Image (cartoon, helix red, strand yellow):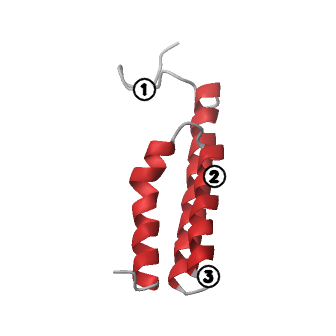
Amino acid sequence: MKSDSKPGTQNSQPPDSAWGQAVREENRRLRYLRFLVDLALAEIRAGSFSLAQARQVVENIRSQTLQLFPGKETAFEWIYRPRFHRAITETFHLH
């Protein structure tokens, strides 16, 4: 039987494979994390929290991040912590 696809363009995994499902699940977790971070940043910038509450929100998001992505402490510290720090510094005028 002849295939309609060009040589070298076939995926190594079928679309419904365990690998594909794992990728979709990781993408879902990443979208959820982005939603949490964006929501928390918006609430911090809106002044919805006291300084202590804002700092607690950051720690709660960090805990949630590590539940979603175990072992990614460094990634949180490099990617998300600076964003939260900037939002808190600007909102509470901590320059």
Q: Within 10 Å of the Cα at label 3, are there few (<14), some (14-19), or many (20+) other Cα atoms?
A: some
| Residues under numbered marks 1 and 2 in contact, where contact means CB atoms less than 8 Å apart | no
Label 2 sits on a secondary structure element that is: helix
* Placement of 86 over or under 31, stated as above or below: below
CA separation in Å, label 3 and label 1: 56 Å
Judging by the rendered image, the residue that carries numbered circle 3 is 49
Judging by the rendered image, the residue that carries numbered circle 2 is 63
Sequence-first disc among 2 and 3: 3
Sequence-first disc among 3 and 1: 1
Query: Residue 95 in the image: x percent, y percent?
Result: 33, 80
Amino acid at circle 3: Phe
Query: Residue 77 in the image: x percent, y percent?
Result: 44, 52
Q: Within 10 Å of the Cα at label 1, are there few (<14), some (14-19), or many (20+) other Cα atoms?
A: few
Amino acid at circle 2: Ser
Judging by the rendered image, the residue that carries numbered circle 1 is 5
Query: Residue 5 in the image: x percent, y percent?
Result: 42, 26
| Residues under numbered marks 2 and 3 in contact, where contact means CB atoms less than 8 Å apart | no
Label 3 sits on a secondary structure element that is: loop
Amino acid at circle 1: Ser
Asked which quadrant contains residue 26, the reply is top right
Give the residue drawn at x 53%, y 69%.
38
Sequence-first disc among 1 and 2: 1
